[in-house]
């Protein structure tokens, strides 16, 4: 699997930067996440006669749990589905250490915390984590489509930016059918190599040290680390954010660099 340029070069660059603004006569909420077209996505492109299927198309048909590379590179990602606890601190740490991350937002989070969503989008790539974080196995196809596209619309409205054409399933509960539907809507499925489990909190037996240890144990070329901003209960420490400085320092100490997930779209 390789992520490479979009079918239209200008659209690719804009998606990578996450800075497309509405074109005259069209709303951001109507645009296809893959092409930027105002008339919807239709069926995702496939390779025809050996032709390059394009950037996101090369990822279609499977989940991505590791960036395809042999270099000692790691990508940091955060899910944002609950409250905004820790968002400002996480952004401050990332900015201070000049480290990129990708944030996967639910549509409901974007609606409830538009300021936090805009702050994330202003400095980092943002992806789609469904609208309400349901179990996709319990959804009909129309319901699943509404979850994906409803989130896309909500994120665009809240941030004024175009999310990356990347989708992460709630609970990482992927199925071949679910991935195929996400592909048809213009999204590649990006999961993770390891979850820090920081979201469990101290009540779930986690500590900052255990969070860091889980990252270290998963270090491998192309690893994708999943963390969370906020807490499920809306209270208590956001352990992933507390651990973030140590995570970054430890990754670097092991000879790895932290790369921007957007760069693999180039």
Image (cartoon, rainbow, N blue to C red):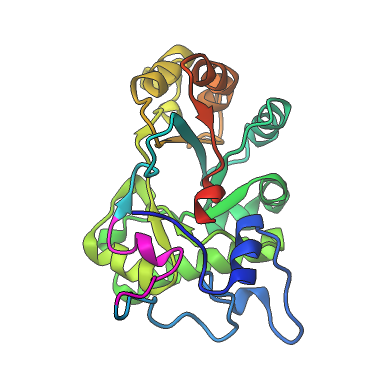
The magenta stretch spans residue 57? yes
Q: Relative to residue 199, is residue 58 depicted above or below?
A: below
Task: Give the image quarter of residue 202.
Answer: top left
Q: Position of residue 67 (x, y in %)?
A: 40, 43
At 59% from the left and 75% from the top, the residue drawn is: 36
Residue closest to the eye, 186 or 137: 186
* Residue 175 position by quadrant: bottom left
Magenta segment, which residues?
50-62
* Residue shown at the point (37%, 68%) measured from the top left: 183
Q: Is residue 226 left or right of residue 29?
A: left
Q: Residue placed farthest to the left in the image?
A: 176
Residue 219 falls in which quadrant of the image? top left
Q: Main secondary structure of the magenta part?
A: loop
Q: Is residue 134 something one can see in this rendering?
A: yes
**Which residue, as the protein is rendered here, is positioned at the far front?**
50
Q: Quadrant of the N terminus?
A: bottom left
x and y, in percent, of residue 152 in the image = 54, 65
Residue 139 in view: no
User: 126 or 61, which is in the foreground?
Assistant: 61
Total label count? 0
Left of 117 or right of it: where is 184?
left
Q: Is residue 100 above or below residue 243?
A: below
Q: For the point 77% across and 84% down, which residue is it?
A: 24
Q: Position of residue 226 (x, y in %)?
A: 44, 36
- 111 up-or-down from 89: above or below: below
Q: Nearer the viewer, residue 40 or 70?
A: 70
Where, quadrant-wise, is the C terminus in this rendering? bottom right
Q: List the single residue furthest toward the right.
A: 24
Picture coordinates of residue 14, whole percent (x, y): 66, 64
């Amino acid at each position: 699997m390789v992520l490479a340029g979009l079918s239209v070069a200008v659209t690719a660059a804009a998606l990578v930067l996450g800075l497309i603004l509405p074109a005259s006569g069209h709303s951001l909420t109507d645009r296809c996440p893959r092409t930027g077209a105002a008339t919807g996505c239709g069926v995702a492109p496939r390779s025809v006669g050996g032709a390059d299927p394009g950037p996101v198309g090369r990822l279609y048909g499977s989940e991505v749990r590791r960036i395809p590379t042999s270099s000692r590179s790691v990508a940091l990602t955060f899910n944002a589905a609950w409250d905004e606890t820790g968002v400002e601190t996480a952004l401050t740490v990332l900015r201070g250490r000049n480290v990129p991350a990708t944030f996967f937002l639910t549509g409901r989070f974007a609606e409830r915390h538009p300021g936090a969503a805009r702050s994330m989008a202003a400095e980092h790539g943002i992806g789609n984590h469904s609208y309400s974080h349901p179990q996709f196995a319990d959804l009909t196809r129309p319901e699943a489509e509404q979850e994906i596209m409803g989130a896309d619309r909500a994120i665009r409205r809240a941030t004024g930016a175009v999310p990356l054409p990347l989708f992460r399933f709630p609970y990482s509960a992927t199925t071949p059918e679910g991935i195929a539907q996400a592909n048809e809507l213009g999204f590649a499925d990006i999961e993770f190599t390891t979850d820090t489990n920081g979201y469990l909190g101290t009540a779930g037996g986690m500590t900052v040290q255990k969070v860091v240890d889980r990252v270290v144990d998963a270090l491998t070329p192309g690893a994708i680390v999943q963390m969370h901003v906020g807490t499920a209960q809306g209270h208590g420490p956001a352990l992933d954010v507390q651990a973030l400085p140590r995570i970054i320092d430890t990754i670097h100490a092991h000879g790895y660099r932290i790369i921007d997930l957007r760069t693999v779209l180039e």
